[in-house]
Amino acid sequence: MKRKNLISLIATSAISLIFILLTTESQTKIAQPPTIQTGAPSETTCGKSGCHNTAPNSFSGTLSITCNQSFYTPDSTYVFTITTSETGMTRFGFEATLLDASNIKRGVWAIINTTTTTLQTATNNRSYVGHKTANSTNSWSFEWTAPSTNVGDVTIYVASICADNNNSSGGDHCYTNSLVLQPQMSSVKAILNSENNFQLIQNPVTDKILVSYNNSIKGKSLIRLLDLNGRVVKILLNEEQNTGSQTSTFLAPETSGLYLIDYSNGNNHTVKKVIVL
């Protein structure tokens, strides 16, 4: 009988310890989200086994990202608003980071409401803004100041949790979303005539666009076709390349007119006008 009581006591204690550990972990995440969980390139989310146990975007909830401008100008400040919701859920949280086309952190976050949002910097040198305490608040606003130079497109990556507040990971749902900000057209004009390592082999063009360029780093090279408002018409090239001289040929757009060719590699960023006949 004593042996059975001892075994029962040990089992009860073990269960209690597991409950305490799980509750502690849950409370930590309620107080502040873990970093590197936005779903951005090379990141996961909290929608996984051992955390909230459901794959992202598997249910009917929503996650929206809005900004007071669709373009950015260097050194200017903008307001992002994140809103997430799902019927039947009562506790909400989020985390966001912002990267350029080479997945490098750009710009600076600033908190508007210190009661609801918080900032963190992770070991990957990325900055994160997230909920301060996960509760019934499901919308958060914060500021972002653009870098001092035009760095091309930047993307904000966001992951959210809609939870049922039952003190367990079961029944919680994860959502992800992203939003791209392009450089303001005035910034594009400012670099049209700058010294660069990117050249159009022929201009005007008819059916093909031929370019030559010199990559300064081994990494992602991005070449885009833009309209005169800075909007992306087509991604011509987006791949990892070696340093040094490169040449590429792309199909010209079917519609004649004046376009912009936007090239970026590392810190190099060049825009050229191209006439399509």
Image (cartoon, rainbow, N blue to C red):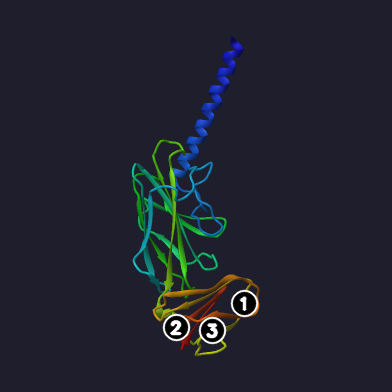
117 vs 246, left or right, is: left
> Could you tell which of marks 3 and 2 lies nearer the N-terminus?
3
Callout 3 environment at 10 Å: few (<14), some (14 to 19), or many (20+)?
A: some
Report the residue marked by disc 1: 216
Q: How many marks?
A: 3
Secondary-structure class at tag 1: loop
Q: Give amino acid for label 1.
A: Ser
> Could you tell which of marks 1 and 2 lies nearer the N-terminus?
1
In the image, 241 versus 218, the foreground residue is: 241
In the image, 44 versus 224, the foreground residue is: 224
Instruction: From this view, report whether residue 194 is shown above or below residue 43.
Output: below
Residue at mark 3 to residue at mark 1: CA–CA distance: 25 Å
Secondary-structure class at tag 3: strand
- Name the residue at 48% across, 55% down: 38
- Name the residue at 50% across, 51% down: 45
Residue at mark 3 to residue at mark 2: CA–CA distance: 13 Å
Label annotation for residue 208 = 3
Callout 2 environment at 10 Å: few (<14), some (14 to 19), or many (20+)?
A: some
Q: What is the x, y in percent for residue 187? A: 43, 79
Q: Give amino acid for label 3.
A: Lys
Which quadrant of the figure contains the N terminus? top right
Report the residue marked by disc 2: 259
> Could you tell which of marks 3 and 1 lies nearer the N-terminus?
3
Contact? badges 1 and 2 (CB < 8 Å): no
Q: Give amino acid for label 2.
A: Tyr
